[in-house]
Image (tube, helix red, strand yellow):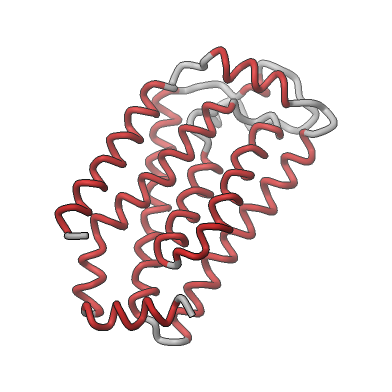
Amino acid sequence: MSHLSKLFWALVMWIVAGIVITLLHETPAWSMNTFLWVVTDELTPTGVLASTIIMLVLMILFVGVMVRAWAVKNRFLLGQMSVGGTFAVVMYMMNLLLKNRYERIRPCHHIEVATECPLIGNFSYPSNHTVIAFGLAAGLAFAVPRLAYLVYPLAMVEGIARVIAGHHYPHDVLAGATLGMFGVLGALMATQFVVLAVVGDKDSRRLTSDADK
């Protein structure tokens, strides 16, 4: 795929993310009804625990791949992971701005749940945890494609766990997943030429092959 094609698809991803976030900023009826259906006092502690564990697993995987890339001197993989991690943080910061712009109150402030609810000023839309989970998953899957079969399901379960915990409506999670995944993937596609310029095209082919072994 040419660099111009990558820029085009990156732009498409960012536009889609923007459209989804804009369309979902008001709580839809289906989201409210789904929340009321899945959230129970018996399951909310499990949601909190699962969310914490999955986030730790994704972070450990991300750091582990970076450490391995550094240890074997795989500059291309290390560069891809560094860019992915950087833009995952950028999406997180962008999400904080969106939260403060929309100021959507968490469902656990409207409906009593068995777990502790974040402070009233810690807004709900979009879901920060889901942005981070899908951002890390996108970075891992882009750099090491075979990991996609592991990290994307983990990110999906993270989003579901945030709903079960009573901290988010489903549409909070959907918006967060879109921002995290499309935001990071788009950025990686748009900036891949920078990594190629640093390590060289020959290096990138060899090192990518090594990474898949």
Residue at the extreme left of the image, as rendered: 4
In this rendering, the answer to whether 178 lies above or below 148 is above
Q: How many marks?
A: 0
Residue 100: image quadrant is: top left
Which residue shows up at 41% across the image and 40% down it?
179
Quadrant of the rendered image containing residue 35: top right
- Percent position (x, y) of residue 85? 42, 60
Quadrant of the rendering where the N terminus is positioned:
bottom left
- Residue, x 18% and y 52% (percent of image)? 5
Name of the residue lying farthest toward the right: 42
Q: Is residue 188 left or right of residue 179?
A: left
Position of 132 relative to 101 (above/below) = below
Q: Quadrant of residue 32?
A: top right
Image coords of residue 212 (percent x, y):
46, 75
Looking at the image, residue 191 lies above or below residue 23: below
Side of 179 relative to 106 (left or right): left
Identify which residue is drawn at 58% across, 44% down.
156
Is residue 16 left or right of 202 when viewed as pictured? right
The answer to whether residue 8 is above or below residue 95 is below
Q: Nearer the viewer, residue 102 or 153?
A: 153
Residue 54 locus on image (x, y percent) = 65, 53
For the point 52% across and 63% down, the residue is: 147
Q: Position of residue 87 (x, y in %)?
A: 36, 54
Q: Residue furthest bottom?
A: 72
